[in-house]
Amino acid sequence: MITQWNPSGRTPDFIRTLYRNILDRDPESQEVIDFHTRSAYNSGLCNTIVGFFNSIEYRAKSIPTEETVKKLYRSILNREPEAAGADYHAQQIARGRSMEDVVYGFVESPEYSHRVQQGLALRLQPDVTFDFITTLYQNVLDRDPENQAVVDFHCGVAKNRGLHMAVTGFFTSDEYRAKDLSTVETVKKLYRSILGREPDTWEVEHHAQEIYRGNHWKTRRASLWIVPSITQEHRRG
């Protein structure tokens, strides 16, 4: 039985289908799903799928090549293979073709691309927004995000309302304001989180003054002014 991908579940649901279609079990926990989801964003879809087939758990099953080919079709194309296709890929693997090359061939095939266009298959490229949101947690809140769901939420804000609104949400959050950091330190965090560098002295003074003029960072007006002014440099860089 083939476990079908639910498009509304996005990447996490695709990870669940890999567990079921390749390892014949459910993932242990949400944390495991989050780990593989981050891997998919950082390393790409092909490498994530390859990781399942090359895992110690899968290799310990000593599954015949023919059955591995069937699992490739089920997990990537969501169907059983036709006889000619099964024989071809089994021969390629027997001749030493790497799993990386085999998986790449499936994901880059016209059939998979057609499924993507129909909304029936996942197309995932490394997502710079995902990485950026993760660094915001680390650079602004000094911690890692709780789970994949909160990162997805902030990615949605960035894509739907703009990058500056996503950044503003971190600096105006109750968690950040509870730290009661100085305005100078807030400006430094803005530069570290957006531009990946320390600000010059004049930049600290300039933005600190702008925050003060807006009745400090607690007001939305100040935050909406300062973030776009720095993100402009982020886009030029």
Image: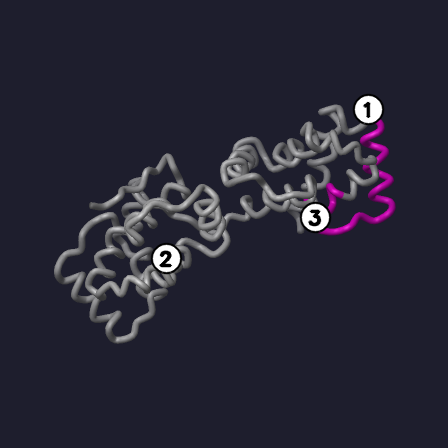
Q: Amino acid at mark 2?
A: Phe
Whether label 3 touches label 1, CB < 8 Å: no
Q: Amino acid at mark 3?
A: Leu
Q: Which residue is mark 2?
A: 52
Instruction: Please tell me whether mark 2 or mark 1 is closer to you in this view.
Output: 2
Q: Which mark is residue 145?
A: none
In the rendered structure, the answer to whether residue 157 lies left or right of residue 104 reads: right
Report the span colored magenta. Answer: 189-214
Q: Amino acid at mark 1?
A: Asn
Q: Which mark is residue 195?
A: 3
User: Earlier along the polypeptide chain: callout 3 or callout 2?
Assistant: 2
Estimate the x, y position of residue 126 in percent, counting from the top left. Answer: 48, 51
Estimate the x, y position of residue 111 in percent, counting from the top left. Answer: 25, 52
How far apart marks 2 and 1 lie (CA) works out to 53 Å
Mark 1 surroundings: few (<14), some (14-19) or many (≥20) residues within 10 A: few
Q: Is residue 115 magenta?
A: no
User: Earlier along the polypeptide chain: callout 2 or callout 1?
Assistant: 2
Estimate the x, y position of residue 129 in percent, counting from the top left. Answer: 55, 44
User: Which sits in the foreground, 164 or 59?
Assistant: 59
How far apart marks 3 and 2 lie (CA) works out to 36 Å
Q: Which mark is residue 215?
A: 1
